[in-house]
């Protein structure tokens, strides 16, 4: 009982450490550096400690200091409670999605089975979806409670956009569910030990739809009409400063990690390397004993998982610096007239193929 | 252990439910309602009904309430503070009548719960509340009510579209 509790605690701390402690701050740097490289500039090299710039890595510290010390401003006529609450409501869903995402398989360590997922829910796939729908409130309330027309316009756009793309996301998830026959994410991951069972082969269209919809859910370019700087100042977080703004900022980066993790898990084999099975690794490192070879497998799998996640984060950033912002009506048209029919067709085709194969 | 989680959760639900009817601004009521539904989802989880809990969050707390709040926000563009509910005298009789009806329903529920054997947790099967179990039940034993409900929802949807279209034209 106590050991189980301890293991869960370690897993939670690990996930928090990786997402909030590592990915979120480092990604702010990666995004700057990548944009600089893609646009042929020398970027992010102003912050220095005694002349050392460390490739601009000190900007992370400068950012954090700036956010901590800025004035926490609440505009006149704003709803104080909701104005404070909404960044929290926006950030928390991004974090708790990781509660059901497995970042490795099941390992026997010192005679104890360790499952590398915080909570192995039977409805894991739906849990992600449910949590994503809660996140909408954070953004909607943020714009409304600021008592600012730009913010309100931004939050109206957020609501419309997130509701529209949630539909596509939910329908693509159904395709995945039909193929794997389970909503338990650990099982979906385990099935993909076989390379030809990877989601990208079984649900190629599903992958593109899901990826597009999740970028839209995260409101990143090209879907960032809710915070369009050229029209709405900064959209729903116009009236936010200091750490509250930092929370919105962090929510976006954590959500990028989450999207990367979900895409990896559903479509790109989760923690598995192609053609390398768990048994293969175990027998290869047999000389280390049971626990030793399991530890090696664990390290390989967790490493592979986060490498894939990093790739998909990188991919989202490439999209950001490649495409211009879509116009608002284009976003709606894409969501309802293109992605939605395609996702319905995906379900239909998936069903027909499954029926034909039986 | 279970009670330790249940009472705070249930208390939270009750407080939030009170918040829905007591608070003066509609947006606060809506947010209380969302919080109440999330609390209720927690109670479902406590009953091992994970699927139901998730549906509660997706359908009620998520989809329906977002639309609901959307409408409230658009209707109250002027000011958050000034808009308040007001009790109209002609509504009093209806309110009292509904109150009595609700009391009657609660009494009935209390009677049913009072007769049930509460201390028999062993009766729950292993796959209780799982997706597979609920799906099988829904598509075998309750297939007719399920399909009828679907058609009803479809009719409501078509109706909404027709009404909205008339206004636009």
Image (cartoon, rainbow, N blue to C red):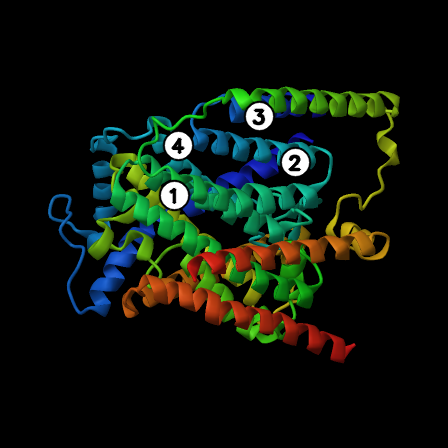
Same-chain status of marks 3 and 1: yes
Question: Quick check: do tags 2 and 4 share a chain?
Answer: yes
Q: Quadrant of residue A271?
A: bottom right
Which residue is denoted by mark 2 in the rendering? A4
Residue at 58%, 62% in the rendered image: A171
Q: Quadrant of the N terminus of chain B?
A: top right
Please, what secondary structure does the residue beneath circle 1 have? helix
Residue found at x 39% / y 40%: B75
Q: Check chain identity for marks 4 and 1: say if they share one.
A: no
Tell me if I can see residue A100 in this picture. no
Report the residue marked by disc 4. Answer: A85
Chain letter behind tag 2: A
**CA–CA distance in space, label 2 to label 1:** 49 Å
Residue A155 at what x, y percent from top left?
A: 35, 46
Which residue appears farthest toward the front when viewing the image? B90
> Which circle, 4 or 3, is nearer the viewer?
3
Disc 2 crowd, CA 10 A, few/some/many (<14, 14-19, 20+): few
Within-10-Å neighbours for mark 1: few <14, some 14–19, many 20+: few
- Distance from Cα at disc 3 to Cα at disc 2: 36 Å
How far apart marks 4 and 3 lie (CA) works out to 19 Å
Q: CA distance from mark 3 to mark 1?
A: 24 Å
Is there a contact, CB below 8 Å, between mark 3 and mark 2?
A: no
The local crowd at label 4, few if under 14, some if 14 to 19, many if 20 or more residues have their Cα within 10 Å, is some
Horizontally, is A42 left or right of B21 in the view? Answer: left
Classify mark 4: helix, strand or loop.
helix
* Subunit under mark 4: A
The answer to whether the residues at label 4 and label 3 have Cβ atoms under 8 Å apart is no
Say which residue label 3 marks.
B17
């Amino acid at each position: 009982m106590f050991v189980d509790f301890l293991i869960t605690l370690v897993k939670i701390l690990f996930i928090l450490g990786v997402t909030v402690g590592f990915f979120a701050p480092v990604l702010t740097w990666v995004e700057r550096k990548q944009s600089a490289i893609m646009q042929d500039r020398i970027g992010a090299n102003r912050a220095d400690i005694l002349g050392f710039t460390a490739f601009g890595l000190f900007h992370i510290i400068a950012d954090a200091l700036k956010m901590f010390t800025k004035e926490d401003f609440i505009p006149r006529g704003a709803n104080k409670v909701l104005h404070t609450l909404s960044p929290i409501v926006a950030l928390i869903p991004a974090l708790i999605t990781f509660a059901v995402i497995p970042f490795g398989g099941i390992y026997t360590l010192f005679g104890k089975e360790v499952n590398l997922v915080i909570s192995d829910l039977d409805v894991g796939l739906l849990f992600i979806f449910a949590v994503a729908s809660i996140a909408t409130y954070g953004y909607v309330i943020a714009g409304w409670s600021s008592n600012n027309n730009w913010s309100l316009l931004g939050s109206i756009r957020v609501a419309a956009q997130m509701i529209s793309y949630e539909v596509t996301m939910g329908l693509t998830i159904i395709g995945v569910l039909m193929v794997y026959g389970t909503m338990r994410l650990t099982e979906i991951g385990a099935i993909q030990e076989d390379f030809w069972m990877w989601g990208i082969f079984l649900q190629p269209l599903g992958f593109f739809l899901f990826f597009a919809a999740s970028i839209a859910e995260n409101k990143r370019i090209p879907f960032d009409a809710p915070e369009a700087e050229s029209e709405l100042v900064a959209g729903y977080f116009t009236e936010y400063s200091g750490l509250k703004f930092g929370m919105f900022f962090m929510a976006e980066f954590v959500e990028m990690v989450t999207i990367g993790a979900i895409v990896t898990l559903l479509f790109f084999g989760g923690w598995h390397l192609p053609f390398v099975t768990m048994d293969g690794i175990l027998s290869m490192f047999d000389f280390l004993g049971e626990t030793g070879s399991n530890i090696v497998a664990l390290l390989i799998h967790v490493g592979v998982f986060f490498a894939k996640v990093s790739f998909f984060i990188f991919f989202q950033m490439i999209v950001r610096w490649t495409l211009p912002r879509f116009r608002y009506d284009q976003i709606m048209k894409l969501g309802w007239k293109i992605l939605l029919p395609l996702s319905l067709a995906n379900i239909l085709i998936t069903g027909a193929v499954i029926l034909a194969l039986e | 252990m279970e009670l330790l989680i249940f009472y705070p959760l249930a208390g939270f639900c009750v407080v939030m439910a009170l918040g829905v009817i007591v608070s003066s601004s509609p947006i606060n009521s809506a947010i209380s309602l969302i919080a109440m539904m999330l609390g209720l989802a927690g109670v479902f989880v406590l009953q091992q009904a994970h699927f139901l809990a998730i549906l509660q969050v997706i359908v009620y707390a998520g989809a329906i309430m977002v639309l609901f709040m959307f409408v409230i926000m658009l209707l109250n563009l002027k000011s958050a503070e000034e808009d308040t509910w007001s009790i109209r005298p002609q509504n009093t009789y209806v309110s009292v009548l509904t109150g009595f009806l609700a009391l009657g329903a609660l009494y009935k529920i209390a009677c049913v719960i009072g007769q049930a054997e509460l201390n028999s947790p062993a009766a729950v099967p292993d796959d209780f509340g799982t997706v597979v179990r609920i799906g099988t039940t829904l598509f075998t034993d309750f297939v007719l009510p399920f399909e009828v409900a679907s058609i009803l929802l479809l009719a409501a949807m078509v109706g909404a579209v027709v009404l909205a279209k008339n206004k636009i034209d």
